[in-house]
Image (tube, rainbow, N blue to C red):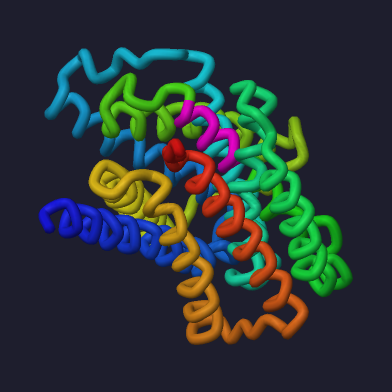
Amino acid sequence: MPVLREETAGLLFALAGFALFSVGDVFVKSIVDEWPAPAIAALRYVLGALVLMIALLAFEGRRGFVLPGAGWQILRGVGVGISSMAFFSALQVMPLATATSIAFTSPIMTALLAAVLLREPMRWATWIASFAAFGGVLLVLKPSISTIGLAALLPLLAAFGMAMLLVGNRAVAGRASALSMQFSVALTAMLVLGPIVALGHLGVIPGPNVAVPHWSVVATCAVIAVLASCAHMLVYLGTTRAGAATIAPMAYVQLLIAGLFGWLLFGERPDATALVGAAIIVAAGLYLWRSGRVADEPQGTD
């Protein structure tokens, strides 16, 4: 019974964490027309890194800043930076639920990237899920590409960035505290996004002109940073209590919340084709998750 209660608590922690991610996305969408999306992403990580640095000093001291696997840490931070910038930019041009559903190709991209970087074996289930998810993405993208062009591909870039983060997480799992790992990601993302925004502002690379934001935009970015940090911590607590494989399906609550808030707050109503595509992407992810759990289960002997 205690084990069951622990797993239930883990699922509830994870559910709350994933739900907070979507709530944060709602706040992002509320300000993407007031300030450039790359700048929002950069400021989110500047604020997050500062808060996490203070927390890390308070709880772990200087030893908390010693992180293993510098290359993997950079991969994690670059990945989450790319993911945030691309996803926030996507919210400027497409419905919240549409962007979220396409971004849920990240589990499939993670499996493909892990095969390349971590030499993990490619199972038949990965290939099947990949082709199915690709078909679902085409259905979701069809109306978007016809209206907004290649910008509709931004959620795929966000999914790839998230896959970079998840592969990096696997490589350094258990080698530092959760707080240290969060600080590493926030710091690296800040160092990546800051120069990109500055160079775009100066016209060195293509990018928007970044004006001084209204105080409400800064306050909203602070809320986004807090929500994201709390979400990461809740998902971590869920993982420690129930296991990563058990809580994985809880991530799909993000799609439900994105659809609900998109409808209630922004008047977004995806068409039937997009809904079918989103369902296929979710089914592909769940199939990949389920096949992985079956493969990991100990086999009995006759």
Residue at image x 13%, y 28%? 59
Task: Classify residue 91 as left or right of residue 299.
Answer: right
Task: Classify residue 6 as left or right of residue 46.
Answer: left
Relative to 51, does residue 287 appear above or below in the rendering?
A: below
Residue at image x 46%, y 73%? 257
Closer to the camera, 145 or 210?
145
Instruction: Decide if residue 56 is in sight here.
Output: yes
Where residue 158 sits: x, y (%)?
Answer: 63, 48
Which residue is at the far right?
A: 146
Relative to 28, does residue 179 appear above or below in the rendering?
A: above
**Span of residues in magenta:** 161-170
Task: Classify residue 216 as left or right of residue 133.
Answer: left
Closer to the camera, 4 or 84?
4
Residue at image x 70%, y 53%? 129
Relative to 115, does residue 27 appear above or below in the rendering?
A: below
Where residue 292 sits: x, y (%)?
Answer: 54, 45
Closer to the camera, 226 or 215?
226
Which image quarter holds the C terminus?
A: top left
Where residue 106 sits: x, y (%)?
Answer: 61, 48
Task: Classify residue 302 as left or right of residue 209.
Answer: left
Which image quarter holds the N terminus?
A: bottom left
Query: What type of secondary structure mainly makes up the magenta span?
Result: helix
Instruction: Decide if residue 193 is in sight here.
Output: no
Closer to the camera, 184 or 169?
169
Where residue 286 sits: x, y (%)?
Answer: 56, 59
